[in-house]
Image (cartoon, rainbow, N blue to C red):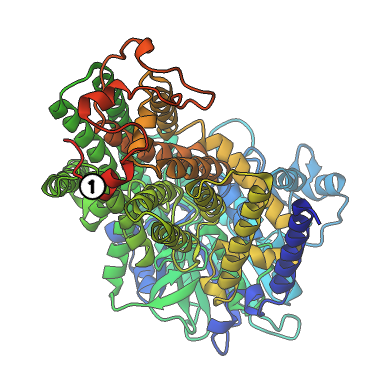
Amino acid sequence: MTPAGVARRVVLAVLALVTVLGAAAPAGAQDGGDDEAVAGRPGRVLVVSIPGLTWADVAEHELPHLEELFAQAAVADLAPRAIGPRATPGEAYLTISAGTRAATEPSVDGQVLALDEESSGSAAGEIFSRRTGVRPDGPYVSLSWPVLVAANADEPYDAEPGLLADTLLDAEVTATVIGNADGTESIGPSYERQVGLALTDTDGVVPNGHLGKDLLVPDVAQPFGLRTDIDAVADRFGPAWAAAEPGPSHPGGGLVLVEASDTARVLRYRSTVDAGRYDELWTDALGATDQLVARLMEDVDLARDTVVVVAPYNRRGDRDLTVAAMAGAGIDPGYLRSGSSQRAGFLTLADVAPTLLDRFDIPRPTSMEGRPALAVDTSDGPAERIDHLVSLNDASRFRERLLTPTTTVVVLLLAVCVALGLAAHTNGWSARARGLIAFAALWDLAILPASYLARAFPLEEQGARFYWLVVVLISLAVAAGATAVARWRARPRLALVIVLAVVGGVIVGDVVTGSRLSLSAAFGYSPTGNSRLYGVSNYSYGQIAVPALLLAAWVAAVRAGRTGRVLATALLLATVVVIGLPTWGADVGGVLAFTPALLVFGLVLSKRRIRLRALLMAGLVTLVAIVAFGLLDLARPPGDRAHLGRLFERVGEEGLGPLLSLVERKLAANLQVSTESLWVAAIPIALALWVYLVRFPTRPLRRLTADLETLPAALAGTLVAAVLGSALNDSGAIVGGVAALVLAAALVVLLMDVEGGPPTARAEVAPPDAEGLPATGAEAPPDAARTGATPAGAGATDRVRGAEPPPG
């Protein structure tokens, strides 16, 4: 059988294995929380939605009733993320409805009307039936439902609007929604009842609710001249809450969602008032919300009921994290975490629906990408917990402000180093000048780990100047210390080895100890901007992969022969484990990119030609690695599974559809990000250096590979790791940009150890053969004649091993 046929059969077998194992996953894979189930689940859940509320608001305002509730709750920062980094009101509530990031049409998504409510001269119920062909059996309908369903069909998230309500109703749990954020100062009516979307069923009907204008009273001092009538809301809530008590018609209990709609109106009013007036209106709205919560809690018994507080969206353009809290039966005060965040103190918006289902002990539909929130015990008191969540948000926001400046500095410094390096080599600058350029390149590399190590300090409290002071001092110390050790050992390239080890070592050490430094680091990840908060980030991948390949080449050169190859392979295999292990890196794209890079490295190192059979084998090994890591993840408790294990769950339940959606989603994100980040500029800079090394008449790359015979293996592996990393990750060319920066800076350091100068007459050097190598018997290049180095290949290994100290 041909290699292609073998490959095809292995791929089909692996896919079948994944499907079988996914389908045979423990029951916890479906509900996400059986192993943490609480005996005697409550029969009633109250959800209080307070749009825009942050923990800083709780700390700064007098909100006694909310503070009393939060003191008894497990709490978290919520990332109000939908399709984009920040959800609109409609996206937020529809994401809760689907348990997955969802899209809406903002111009119409608030049109959730009573059946007899007039719109365009017709009753809403009649319009809805004309548009959907459905005879509504509930009091309210979403007139825009067909538009919303179509909007989500065009997105690669497989969102099913209405899934939460349907799942509750199928389990005989009642669902009621109360709220109205209407208000406009323009001509014509304004319907801002997006809260109804949270509990709309898959037909577009709200089974139970109160969303009418009878919840509002005129108030000329409030946004749009309206405010919530707390008495009216309380009057509707009382019967709905009583009806939520488990009974013959709904033995599963009931859920009631109440929106504090005054804060929603203030958020929309922000663009029409100055900052001072906005603060006054916001303070008033929070005070009214606190009073509303007090009225609602009069009917709630936390010994048997559950209360969930969530702020599903923020004002437009605001990237602050918002409030999430859960109190009640079986919930100890502490922090919340989920399988989505993998971190205590963080939840995502998609986690809300699975959390609500989990409180009723209802299995989570596999199409919900969110995971149930779980309480994590802590010794922190109520005030300490709030302060901690405020600081986490501050750190995340600080990181967002640091990302672009730090990227600009490292890319511009690379450009300067490359330009000066080419000039120095071309014009034969002095050894001192070349040494300074090499040091600058080492410094540029050292800024990468320094940006992570800086997270050990309270940066957001001290400000940007303190951040830059810490980063500069740490990076200079690393570069200077490495240079000093290299001079002491009389081995100039040892400085590069040390710095590369620090670049990769800091990331590896952080990943295996919980990724604490990566959280809110400039090149790590933050809940305000990233959907994943654990493991190896796309920025970190390039800082692990390229140093590992270069260090492996160095190890193979220093320990020549079989021992060196074994040690180099072991280093790269360990890197794959760090990148892919679910408890550490959990980077699927990294495994897909780095495993073939490892195999290409091995082929070039052993001087074998890369044939089709070898490429097929690389693909098979990569597939086996992904399956192995996925099965390890699938074997973990449901609440601890990373995204690969969760993907295996869905593939086992639904087939290949979720996998194809994931590929489509990553491709779309890849194309968008690849044109927006300054990291992309590092790629042409590195290409310019590569062209010089290959095409300059003295062929500098030939000298470099003569001194380090294993360098071609590292270069080939880096090319594969960078290209596949850019293609397979949703950060796109950013991955290639980071890899290009690390490689280019390393090559500048190596180039500065090679004396250059104006090329002599070409007659002195034999013309290259077809492969770009000097013809047999050619004289040594002028570089070799000046430095006393042997011709290409002769004695090169001894120089790397340190048998003879290299010049300079």
Q: In the depicted view, which residue is nearer to us: 511 or 131?
A: 511
Query: Where's the C terminus, which quadrant?
Result: top left
The residue shown at (26%, 35%) is: 441
Query: Where's the N terminus, which quadrant?
Result: bottom right
The residue shown at (51%, 72%) is: 640
The x and y percentages for residue 456 are 23, 58
Q: Is residue 737 left or right of residue 90?
A: left
Q: In the depicted view, which residue is nearer to us: 600 or 122?
A: 600
Q: Quadrant of residue 172?
A: bottom right
Q: Is residue 730 left or right of residue 718?
A: right
Q: Which residue is mark 1?
A: 494
- Judged from this view, the residue extending furthest toward the front is 777
The x and y percentages for residue 405 are 30, 35
Q: Is residue 440 left or right of residue 9?
A: left
The x and y percentages for residue 294 are 43, 70
Q: Is residue 788 visible?
A: yes
Residue type for callout 1? Leu
Q: In the depicted view, which residue is nearer to us: 712 or 620?
A: 712
